[in-house]
Image (tube, rainbow, N blue to C red):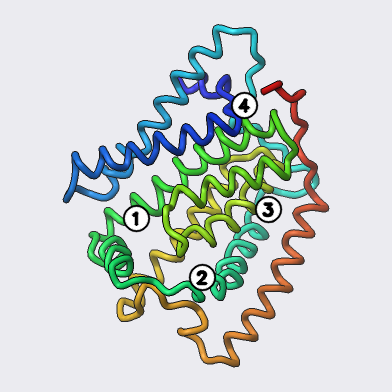
Amino acid sequence: MIQYFKYYKPGLGQSWLLVGILLVGGIIAGFLLPDGPQSLSYAINMLFPLAWAWLMGQQAKETPTEPVPVNAPDFGKISPALLLILGTLATFCLSVLTDPLVSVIPMPDSIKAIFEKVFMDTPLWDMVIATCILAPLLEEFLCRGLMLRGMLQRMSPGKAIAWSSFLFAFMHMNPWQAIPAFVLGAMFGWIYWRTRCLWVTIFLHFFNNGLSTLMSRCMPDVTMDTGWKDILPPAVYWILFAACVVALAISLYLIHEKTLPAEVPPRVET
């Protein structure tokens, strides 16, 4: 059944359609389960674009089109363990470095209340399943495994990564998540292009969401618009910020030097 996905190679237009279907699915899931488990509501939401992708892949298989695997790891000269270590370090560094960008946008009390309900009032088991398991698996499959993989057949890697990152950010429907989502999505997309390993980006997504979940539960008195700069003493924060700049540069350089961009089949005319 899952084999049909490798025949579906969405371009930019189809990728926008997938995001639109996802948003409609969110409305339907909210209507069906207004007070239900967050994990179940999220799963229903993601079911709609994935079902569409499966149907499109089933149709594409009947045409003379070459399948492109969703996950075809090629790590080049780097070991998977080192790639995960460097990627995890880079993910943490980006969470620190994007903090000032997010903090300049005031968060309305109404939005803050929604965030706090999701992160604080949801049972821990439900939040872990939705945020740390389902979100990394399904969002990476949709945004990198389907949309980015498809757009790489039609445009340059830079444009494909930028568009898939923008769509990933747009999916979150608010600037407080969209800014770090775009930056992280760009790095995840770049790593996926370099390695064609979806499991690596799933793990990095899991680490990012798991860190947010851990911080929200360990520091319940901290509001949702609180950043690293608000938590740490000024001197410690700026030392951490500078260290993250250096660590991020080294991590990305090593990944770039030790991996080779995966070969992309001839572009499909749109």
Residue 225 drawn at (x, y percent): 40, 74
Determine contact: label 3, label 2, CB under 8 Å. Answer: no
Asked whether residue 4 is in view, the answer is: yes
Foreground mark, 1 or 2, reads 2
Three-letter amino acid code at the position of disc 4? Pro
Which residue is rendered at x = 59% and y = 8% of the image? Answer: 63
For disc 2, the marked residue is: 102
Pointer 4 or 3: first along the chain: 4
For disc 1, the marked residue is: 128
Three-letter amino acid code at the position of disc 1? Val
Q: Residues within 10 Å of mark 4 (few under 14, many from 20)?
A: some
For disc 4, the marked residue is: 69
Residue 265 drawn at (x, y percent): 75, 25
Under circle 1, the secondary element is: helix
Residue 11 drawn at (x, y percent): 60, 29
Q: Marks 1 and 4, Cα distance to the nearest angstrom?
A: 29 Å
Pointer 1 or 2: first along the chain: 2
Which residue is rendered at x = 56% and y = 31% of the image? Answer: 13
Determine contact: label 1, label 2, CB under 8 Å. Answer: no
Under circle 3, the secondary element is: helix
Which residue is rendered at x = 78% and y = 58% of the image? Answer: 254
Does 91 appear above or below 243?
A: above
Q: Quadrant of residue 33?
A: top left
Q: Which mark is residue 83?
A: 3
Under circle 4, the secondary element is: loop
Determine contact: label 1, label 3, CB under 8 Å. Answer: no
Q: Nearer the viewer, residue 187 or 196?
A: 187
Q: Marks 3 and 2, Cα distance to the nearest angstrom?
A: 28 Å
Q: Residues within 10 Å of mark 2 (few under 14, many from 20)?
A: some
Three-letter amino acid code at the position of disc 3? Leu
Q: Nearer the viewer, residue 198 or 99?
A: 99
